[in-house]
Image (cartoon, rainbow, N blue to C red):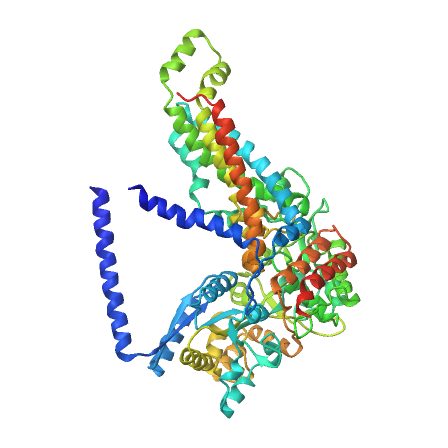
Amino acid sequence: MKRQTFLQLTTTHLIAACALLTGATGKLHAQTPVEVQFFYPVAVGGPITKTIDDFAAAFTKEHPAIKVTPIYAGSYQESIVKALTAHKSGTPPVTSVLLSTDMFTLIDEDAVVPFDNFVKTPQDKAWLGSFYPAFMQNSQAGGKTWGIPFQRSTVVMYWNKDLFKQAGLDPHQAPATWAELKAAATKLTQKDASGKVSTWGVQIPSSGFPYWLFQTLSTTNGALLANEAGTAVKFDDPKVIEALQYWVDLGKAGIHPPGVVEWGTTPKDFFEKKAAIIFTTTGNLTNIKKNAKFDFGVGMIPGNVRKGSPTGGGNFYIFKKSSPAQQQAAFEFIQWITQPERAAQWSIDTGYVAVSQAAYNTPSLKAYGKDFPAALVARDQLPASVAELSTHDNQRVTKALNDGLQAALTGNKSPAQAMKEAQMEADRILRAYK
Amino acid sequence: MLLPALVLLLAFTHWPIVSTLVDSFFSTPKGARASVWVGLDNYAVMVADPVFWKAMRNNLWFAGVTIPLSISLALVMALWVNERMLGRAFLRMAYFTPTVLPMIAVANIWLFFYTPQYGLLEQISAALGLPSHNWLGSPSTALGAVTLVAVWKEAGFFMIFYLAALQSQNPSLREAAAIEGASRWTFFWRVQWPLLMPTTVFVLVNAFINGFRMVDHLFVLTRGGPDNASTLLLFYLYEVGFSFWDTAYAAAITVVLVSILVGMALLQFFVLDRKVHYQ
C-alpha cells in the first residue's frame, strides 16, 4: 500500500513537472530568445547563488532577447570537470566561470574561443583595456584574450593586533620585509613551560595547492615560475630555491608550524590565536571579519627584493561548440556583468577583488573602502601582483611543484633537491609543447 | 522482469569495462588531435610512474590494515551489543552512526580532530603530557590517520551484518552450551564463529572492495599529500582522469584496479567460499 501511494505521488509530481516544463519551453519558442547556459562555481562563503541569480534576472530584464540561465556547478574542480565533459560530449555551456589557470588546458582541448572575435567597437576595446593588467596576465596567451576576469583574488597577510601588543610590537605596523617578518614571528611565538609552542609567529598553509602560497615567496624574491607562453618553468632557479629555503627555515627556527599546514584550518588557527600572522586569500576577509574576536590587520605580503603576490580566482570563458548567436549573447552578458557598478557590488557582496580601477571609483565601493579599509589592501597590492602559475598541462606541472614543496617542508628532501626533481618532471611533461 | 536489470548492468557496468580496456590502448585525444593506437604505451608509462607505485603500495597497506581491523572490531562490537544489557539500543545506534554520515562531512569533522594544537587528538595527548604532532601534515603519520577514519567508518557497517547473523542464531545453542558447561570462549570459537562464516565471507568481500574504493575522505583530509604520502589508487586515478585530463592513462590504471578487484572476488568466491559451511 505504502509503496503504491509513494509511486502515485511521484508520478503525479513528475507529470506536473513535465507540464510545467512544456509550458516553459512553449513560451520560449514564442519569443525565441537566445538561451545562454552559464556554469559558475562557488568557492567562498556567502550567498553567491542569490547574487548570481539576481544578476542574470536583471540582465534578462534589460535584454529580453537573451535568456541567461545560471547553473551552479560545484567547486572550481567540479565545474571544470562538468564543463569539459559537456564539451567532449558536444553540448558545453555557452559560458562558464573557471579558474584563470585553466586557460591553457581549455585552449589545448580546443574548448574555448578568444574574446577578440567579439571586440569590435571602440567601446568594446576600451572595456577590454579597463581590467587590471595583473588579472589579464592569466587571461591572455599568444596575443589573444581567452578569459575575462570576474571573481579574482590574491594572497594577503592577516595579523593579530592583540598578540602584536603582547609581544611588544607596534600593532599598526605590519612586517614589510622577509627579515622583519622573521623577527616579528620570533617575538610572537609563545611557548609554555614545557617548551611546547602555544602560538606560532607565522603560518603559511601548504596543503592542496602549496604552489599558490609559495608564489608569495618566489615572487618577492624576484623569480617568475613560468614563462608567459606556459611552455617552460623555472623551478630550479636559485632564487626559487632560496625562497623555499626561507620557508623551510621558518619551520626550523621553530616559529612556523612543522610539516604540511592545512589550508582549511588556517583561518580557525588564526581565530584561536594559535597563529599570530597568517597568509591566506582575500576571499577569507569576510569570514575573518566575522569570526575574529580581536583587532586584526590586513597587509601586503612582505617583500624581499621586490613586493608581490600571485593573483588567483576565476575568469569567464566562452565555449566553442555553441552557436555564434549564443556566443555573441554570452559576450554581451559578460560585458554587462563586469561593468564598474556591478563589479563593485560583486566585490562588496563576496570579498573578491573588483576587476577594474573604474569599479573602485564607483561611489558604493568608495564608501565601503572608507568604512572598511582592509578591503582595499588587495587592490593596492595589484600593481606588484603576478600571474598565478599556469602552464600547458597545468595541473600535472603544478603537482610536480606541489610534491616538491611538500617534500621540502616535511624535511624529506632539501629545497635544492626537491626543486631540481620538480624541474625535471615539469620539463618532461612540457616537452610536448615546446 | 530481469531484462531491465540486465540492460542496466550491461550499459553501465560491462560495456564501460570493455570500452575502458579498449581506451587504454589508445592515446588521449586532445583538441584537434584524435586518439591513436599506442599499444601498451600507457602501461609502460604506468610501470615507470613512481606516483602510481606509491599509490599502489599505500593502497595495499591501507587495505591490509582496514580489512582485518574493521572486521575484528565489527565482530567484537556485534558480540557486545548482542548481549542483554542496559542502553543496548543506544549503543547499537552509536556504533552504526558513522556508517550513516556522509564521508565528506565526516572527513571535515576528523580534519578538526587531527588539527595540531587544539584538535581533539592534541588535547588528549597534551593532557597526557605527550608532545604535539601534526598528524595529517607529516609523511610518517598521514596514511595512518586516513586509515583510522576508514576503519571507524567501516566497523559500524560490518557490525550490522554480524549482529543480524548473531540474532538469527538459534538461542537453544547457547542453552545447550550452558548445560554442557562450555566457557564463553569455547561457545564463541566452536559454535558462533563457524556459524558466522558465511557472514564473514560476505563482509570480507565488501571490506576488500571498500579497501580500494574508499577515497572520499582524502579529498578533504590530505588530498593525497604530503608529497603523495597518503595517495591511494582510486584517488590517483581521479587525479589523472579529471585533473590532468589524461583519460587514456586513467583508463590503463582503471584496468589494473578492476583486475585487482575481479581477481580478489574470484579468489573469494571460488576458494574461500568452499571452505565455508552454510546451514
Counting labels gives 0
Find residue A323 and report its image quarter. bottom left
Q: Which quadrant is home to the C terminus of chain A? A: bottom right
Q: Nearer the viewer, residue B254 or B238?
A: B254
Q: Is residue B193 above or below residue B211?
A: above
* Rendered location of residue B258, percent (x, y): 53, 44
**Residue A56 visible in the shown view:** yes
Is A256 left, or right, of B202 in this rendering?
Answer: right
Is A52 left, or right, of B43 in this rendering?
Answer: left
Q: Which quadrant is home to the N terminus of chain A? A: top left
**Residue B85 visible in the shown view:** no
Q: Residue furthest bottom?
A: A122
Question: What residue appears at the point 24 percent right and 69 percent down from the top-left corner?
Answer: A23
Q: Is residue A268 above or below residue A223?
A: above
Find residue A301 and report its image quarter. bottom right
Q: Nearer the viewer, residue B54 or B91?
A: B54
